[in-house]
Each structure stands twice: as structure tokens, then as C-alpha cells.
Image (tube, rainbow, N blue to C red):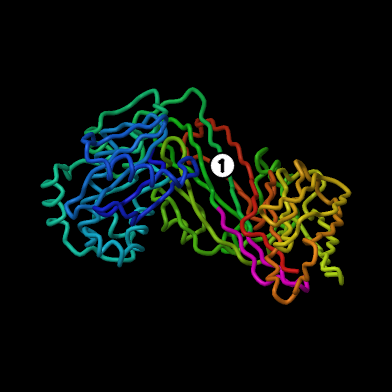
Amino acid sequence: MVSALFIYSLRGELLISKHVNNIVQKSMSEIFRIQVINNLDVRSPVLTLGSTTFHHIKSVGNLWIVAVSRSNSDSAAIWEFLYKLNALLKAYGLDSEKEMKEEFMTCYELLDVILEEGVPVDTELSNVAARMSVKPKIGIESFNSFAESIGYSTDRIIPRSRLLTRRTSSLASHDSLHEQHSNVPWRMIGIKYKKNEVFLNVNERISILVSKDGSILRSYVDGTVEATTHLSGMPICRFGLNDALSVTTPFDDGPVDNMNKKAIPKAAAGSVMLEDCKFHQCVQLDKFQNDRTINFIPPDGNFVLMKYHVRENLNLPFKITPTVTVSRSSSVDYRITIKSLFPSKLTAKDVQLRIPVPPETVNCQLSTSNGKCKFVAEESAIIWKFSKYQGLTENSLSATAFPVEDFQLNIDQWPRPPMSLTFEIMMFSNSGLVVRFFDILDKDKNYSLVKWIKYISKSGAYELRY
């Protein structure tokens, strides 16, 4: 699995940096530049430092293309992907430092198309061009000729499972996959499991900006539906949500759906207006456009089934009421209450409210009804933490920030950075999105399936002015 991908100029300037997950630190790009680009003695195309491995090639336009991995991945498959990426960059005219700087957005779009959670899903130019907003600058024949000139055979497809560390019990050969099931390149044939399972995670991040008077200036939710499938054969899955354009069918009475209805707030029982939906390439889009059901043959293992954006009728998890005043002695008094708005049977974890104080503050007098609170001088902030926060509860904080002696605070010059809140809530949906059903289309009805659905709501940019 590719955890990060970097593209450098010949001199070592970082042009493109794409991190698939948070496993790889941002400093890794600088480490590669020092260890490889600036080191004339390096001749190997692979560098391993601890648990991190760098696979790299140099393009025709003298660009360094680097794939970073942290798992025990197939090096041959990663290099195969790098050479095919090199050919795709050439097809879109991104074969020089100048072009890469001018058209960097095209490069990021290309990486979003061909990489799903760090795994190459489709690197054929005809398929990639159909999903890109920009047309390639060369034709398919020229692309194939160039790909073959750099040593890549265009009659091959990189199978998804070659980059997965987890192997299935039955693996078909690379050529047989292309010949026998070329229309489903993201899934191997002959997969078998003793127990068929599907794990769905509905992950949401809510961002909100509240003004001084308590009105909401901006609010939205960015969500993803991540799936982990352990299914035998070539199953056709059917998946439905309560989005506003869905057919108005009631909830199924299955145990999973009943569990969801108990865990999700009543506000989530209605319809949700989804925007900017993006699906994995396995989804049959024509079926979704017709009856709003999502039909697909899933990849084996982990993948992102869909991404979405919601702006209307959000379920806010917390309400924060601040009162901030400046005294004649230039000390700043804070009176803050935080109230959880989600059901009492749910609990948020890792709740943290960051309260900015003036930069000249040297001490704070703190008092809270619950949680842990401390003044962090180097951050010019008061940090109020809760390891767990019960639903429908309220807590308060009183604090006074004292500046250095003989310091007169000009309140007009203090920018008053917004307070920010971070949290994570299990089995709560900020958007109100609910999985209505998930089943396997089986004519014989002999396909047994165990389904697990989890909702995870986290904070994005959750900010409050005062």
C-alpha cells in the first residue's frame, strides 16, 4: 500500500505531496531529499529507513517520483505503478518542472483518480481520461508507445490485491485476472471465506463557525462511507441511504437497521440532502441515478465506497456559550459553558476546548465544574479537556488571565483568535445520514451475510468567535 507519494524537481524541490493517511510524517519528504537526492553515492531505487520504505524512479523530464510505504508491500507492483504514473503524467503534459508547477491541480486530480486509499485501482489511460476533468494531450496509441518505451507493458493491469498485505485464500494469476474478469479489475476471482462479513464505517467531520452573537456563519459535514468486505465469489451488493432523493421506503426490520435507529438521534430519521457525492469505481452509477440505490461488486478488503458533503439540517453535538471581558487591570475574565446536545446514552471522547488568551499572559486562575484544565503559556491558550463527555450534560469554566506587570492590554489590537473544539462521538450522525439497508443480490437466497455498521462523528474546524 502506498502511504504517500512525492514528486520532486531534479534539484530536490518538492512539487507534489500527497499523503494517503496520517501514517507517514510530513518530514519524510525532507528525509528523502537529504538521503537520496542530495546524496550522490545512492544508486539503489529503494531506500528503507526503519519501517519506512521509499521506492523511486526518475521520469523522462528529470522528475523524481517517489512512493512511500509503511507496510510489507509488493515492491514490483509499486514500481510498476510508478512507471505507469510516469506514462500518465506524460500523457497529460506533466513531464517537466515548469508544467508540474503550472498544472499541479491536474496532477492531484490524477492521483485522486488512480489511487484509492493508497491502492492503484485503474491506470489505463482510456478509463482515467473518462474520469478526469482535463483531457490528455496525447492519444492512446502514443501513450502505449511511450509506456512500452520506458519498459511498461500496456496489456497488463495492476491487481488491487498485489498491494494489500492481507492475502485471500485463493489467488488467481495476474494474466488470468485480466483475461477472465477484465471488467472487474479491482477484484480477484476465486475468493472464498468461511464467514461472509461486511463492515461499514460512516465517518463524518463537522465544521462550524459561530459568530459573537451565537449565529452560525458556516456549517457543513464532510463524510465518507468506508467498507471492509470479506465476501466469497463475485457478490453484487445493494446499499441504500436516507438521502433526500432516495425512494421513500421505510426502514428494514433487520437487526442492523434496528440497532441504527436506536443509536441515531431522531433528527436523523428524516431525509438528508447529499452534495458532491463521489463513488468508488465499482459502483454502478446508472443504477444510483435511477432509483438512488448503490449497486456494486466490492473490492476485497478495505476501500472508500463513497464521499459526500452536507450543509443543511445538521445535528450540532455541542453548544458553547462564552462571555469574555477585559478589566481595568488588563486581566481577561472568561465565563464559558459547554453543553452536549446528543442523546444521554451516548458519550463523546477526547473532548478538548482550546481557549486563546492574550500573548502577554503569564498566569491563569482556573475553576471548572468538571474535566481537566490547564494554562499552556507557549500556546497562549487555556486547554479544557474531558476524556469522556456524557450526552445532554452541561459544564462551566471560570478563568482569569493575568498579563505581565505594567502591561496595558489594548483590546482593539488583540485579534481574539476563535475558540476551537475537538471531539469524537460513536454512533452519532452529524448529518443525519442513516444506512437503510445493505444486502447481497442472490437469486437462490443462500448467501449468508453478517453486517456491522458503525457511525463515527469527529470535529473538523469547529470554531467559535467571542
Question: x and y percent of residue 16 in the render?
Answer: 35, 55
Q: Quadrant of the N terminus?
A: top left
| Front position in the image: 435 or 442 | 435
Residue at the spot x=64%, y=69% of the render?
A: 218
Name above or below for residue 337 compared with residue 304: below
Decide if residue 91 is in sight here. yes
Task: Give the left or right position of residue 219, taking residue 386 as reference.
Answer: left
Residues shaded magenta = 207-223
Examine the structure image and report whether residue 221 is included in the region drawn in magenta: yes
Question: x and y percent of residue 156 in the render?
Answer: 21, 41
Examine the structure image and report whether residue 88 is included in the region drawn in magenta: no
| Front position in the image: 164 or 199 | 164
Q: Main secondary structure of the magenta part?
A: strand
> What is the quadrant of residue 329 in the picture?
bottom right
Question: x and y percent of residue 245 in the render?
Answer: 56, 63
Query: Label 1, on which residue?
Result: 200
Decide if residue 394 is in sight here. no
| Front position in the image: 457 or 17 | 17
> What is the quadrant of residue 438 in the picture?
top right
CA neighbours of label 1 inside 10 A, class few (<14), some (14 to 19), many (20+): many
Question: x and y percent of residue 146 in the render?
Answer: 13, 52
Amino acid at dot 1: Leu
Task: Give the left or right position of residue 295, taking residue 98 as reference.
Answer: right
